[in-house]
Image: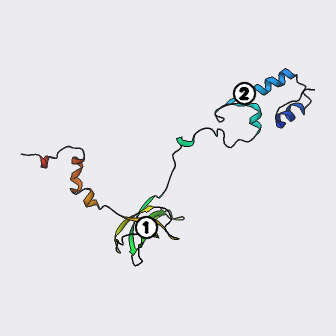
Amino acid sequence: KVKHTLSPYLRNLIFGRGITMTTSLISSLQTLKLSSPFANGSTPLSTLSKPNFFPNPGRPAATVPVIRAMKTMQGRVVCATNDKTVAVEVVRLAPHPKYKRRVRKKKKYQAHDPDNQFKVGDVVLLEKSRPISKTKSFVALPVVSRSVRNPEGRGGAGNDLGIPLESQQPA
């Protein structure tokens, strides 16, 4: 007798019903490759009987971008009494679970303020960092105000493109 190297599933399927096969037919079955769009190319028949959750482990995973949610948030300082720490309240809009209306959700975060530069009422940017203490894993940064970013208001869009406005052209 010839020892068969088919998977147990295929061996039971073929030989369990009393089907007789020659050695050449068995060897041709073992070398048979099935092609499927889900298997990333051709796969030997013996490996199809095993569950394969990771079809191609040698493939680099660099093609899938890593998503890092909530790296920065913006909020208002509500408490600045502690040394090098400010409490910042972040407000976000989320749909109500039952009524589907957008509702304000507030959450307080402790943030690191190394220079004690922020006072109550200041708007700050929270940036995620390594854990500084048990409750602090954000660093408070000053927010650039809109007037500093665009001092000319709405009419400054023409200067961003390098095109002078009619009011700026000499007469």
Q: Which residue is mark 1?
A: 90
Relative to 146, is 138 on the left or the right?
Answer: right
Closest to the observer, 96 or 146: 146
x, y percentage for residue 14? 86, 31
Do the numbered discs 2 and 1 sit on residues whose CB atoms are within 8 Å?
no
Q: Which residue is mark 2?
A: 33
Crowd rating for badge 1 (residues with CA inside 10 Å; few <14, some 14–19, many 20+): many
The quadrant of the rendering that contains the N terminus is: top right
SS for dot 1: strand
Q: Is residue 164 visible?
A: yes
- Residue at the outermost left position: 171
x, y percentage for residue 12? 87, 35
The residue type indicated by label 1 comes to Val
| Residue drawn at x 79%, y 27% as measured from the top left | 30
Q: Is residue 101 visible?
A: no
SS for dot 2: strand
